[in-house]
């Protein structure tokens, strides 16, 4: 099958959508499919190149401030490029939004994946977003053969906006379960954490929707160390450091660490903490589960669904600090959650997720 995947940005850029598209492309190609990723131009990268068995086709965008406009060549390539199937990833991004008026004239069936509705939940402009999600999006998706959602909650949002239920499918994010076996030791010793002190872990960057301030409060209430891993995307670190001093919390901001250090942190922490206002999915919770690390999370993204598998807790915001403190104090419960989480994470291995997508692609192509 000749498959086109679209992504607003792609390797070497890093992000949730980029990772999903890269995993799909590589694993589909390994199964013999002819795969191309259409994306934006990147400094220092050629407009066409091969990687991991698939092709990357980059299109030079016209940039005006924060706006990006695709060339006609991108629209024509997506619409009539000789593909058997086009899988469009993301919304409120140039690579999808400019295709909406053309969906009805596509020569190949379309599969659409939203990857969460950040603007609707976090940076909402009522008139604009009401028009986009309640009018523009459902009208465009009348021409899609299938629409996938990462979670049941995302499925229900799409249904509420008028996407027919028969088109909707829940297909979660995945992970490479094997990468979380035999995790390396040494995080505590290398970074100066006491071997016997309770250690909370957060990995994911200092984005506003992640609400790391809630983790600082939870660490203070639990009298635990908090290790924060990830880049300071919006200049939040100074404010959070001041908050930690005010609360008397033991918090260390490590920035971006080598992958081996991150995996070691998953091995040696006691609880993974995620207090986001919004998550499209929350892949890091799956990573914690695969590591045998129990989590406490707010009710965002996939957290409620993942918690029902036994690997962690999903609680209301007001209950978050107490839930963290109580779980840190209960070693037997943490061990049981760790075992259940590791077992449940195997359901989300990328090969299983790709199996689901391939079955959907074949169904769509037959129809």
Image (cartoon, rainbow, N blue to C red):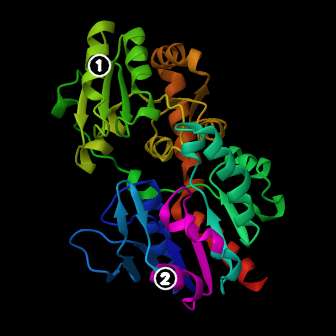
Looking at this view, name the residue that lies furthest to the bottom: 82
Foreground pick, 223 / 58? 58
Q: Nearer the viewer, mark 1 or mark 2?
A: 2
Which comes sooner in the sequence, label 1 or label 2?
A: 2
70 magenta-colored: no
Foreground pick, 272 / 270? 272
Instruction: Relative to 199, say whether 33 is above or below.
Output: below
Q: Which residue is mark 2?
A: 35
Q: Which residue is mark 1?
A: 196
Instruction: Relative to 152, say whether 68 is above or below.
Output: below
90 magenta-colored: yes
> Quarter holding the N terminus?
bottom right
| Residue extent of the magenta highlight | 73-101
Foreground pick, 149 / 101? 101
> Are there few (<14), some (14-19), or many (20+) residues within 10 Å of tag 1?
few
Foreground pick, 140 / 22? 140
Across and down, in percent, residue 128 comes to 61, 46
What residue is drawn where x is 37% and y is 18%?
216
What residue is drawn where x is 41% and y is 14%?
217
> Quarter holding the C terminus?
bottom right
The answer to whether one can see residue 195 in this image is no
Q: Secondary structure at mark 2?
A: strand
Across and down, in percent, residue 366 comes to 76, 85
- Left or right position of 198 against 365: left
């Amino acid at each position: 099958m000749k498959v086109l995947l679209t992504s607003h940005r792609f390797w070497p850029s890093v992000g949730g959508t980029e990772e999903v598209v890269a995993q799909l492309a590589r694993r589909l190609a390994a199964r013999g499919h002819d795969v191309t990723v259409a994306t934006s131009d990147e400094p220092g990268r050629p407009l066409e190149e091969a990687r991991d068995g698939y092709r990357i086709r980059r299109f030079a965008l016209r940039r005006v401030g924060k706006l990006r406009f695709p060339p006609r060549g991108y629209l024509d390539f997506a619409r009539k490029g000789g593909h058997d199937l086009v899988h469009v990833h993301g919304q409120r991004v140039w690579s999808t939004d400019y295709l909406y008026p053309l969906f009805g004239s596509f020569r190949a069936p379309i599969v659409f994946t939203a990857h969460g509705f950040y603007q609707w939940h976090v940076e909402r402009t009522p008139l604009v977003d009401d028009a986009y999600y309640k009018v523009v999006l459902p009208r465009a998706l009348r021409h899609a053969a299938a629409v996938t959602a990462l979670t049941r909650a995302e499925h229900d949002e799409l249904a509420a906006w008028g996407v027919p239920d028969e088109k909707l499918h829940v297909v979660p994010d995945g992970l490479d379960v094997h990468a979380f076996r035999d995790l390396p030791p040494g995080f505590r010793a290398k970074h100066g954490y006491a071997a016997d002190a309770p250690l909370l872990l957060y990995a994911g960057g200092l984005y506003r929707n992640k609400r790391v301030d809630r983790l600082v409060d939870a660490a203070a209430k639990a009298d635990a160390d908090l290790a924060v891993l990830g880049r300071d995307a919006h200049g939040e670190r100074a404010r959070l450091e001041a908050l930690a001093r005010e609360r008397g919390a033991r918090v260390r901001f490590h920035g971006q660490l080598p992958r081996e250090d991150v995996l070691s942190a998953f091995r040696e922490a006691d609880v993974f903490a995620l207090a986001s206002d919004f998550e499209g999915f929350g892949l890091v919770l799956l990573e914690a589960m695969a590591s045998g690390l129990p989590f406490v999370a707010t009710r965002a993204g996939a957290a409620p669904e993942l918690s029902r598998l036994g690997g962690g807790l999903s609680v209301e915001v007001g209950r978050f600090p107490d839930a963290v403190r109580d779980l840190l104090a209960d070693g037997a419960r943490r061990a049981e959650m760790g075992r259940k989480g590791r077992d449940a994470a195997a359901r989300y291995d990328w090969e299983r997720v790709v199996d689901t997508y391939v079955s959907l692609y074949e169904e769509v192509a037959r129809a």
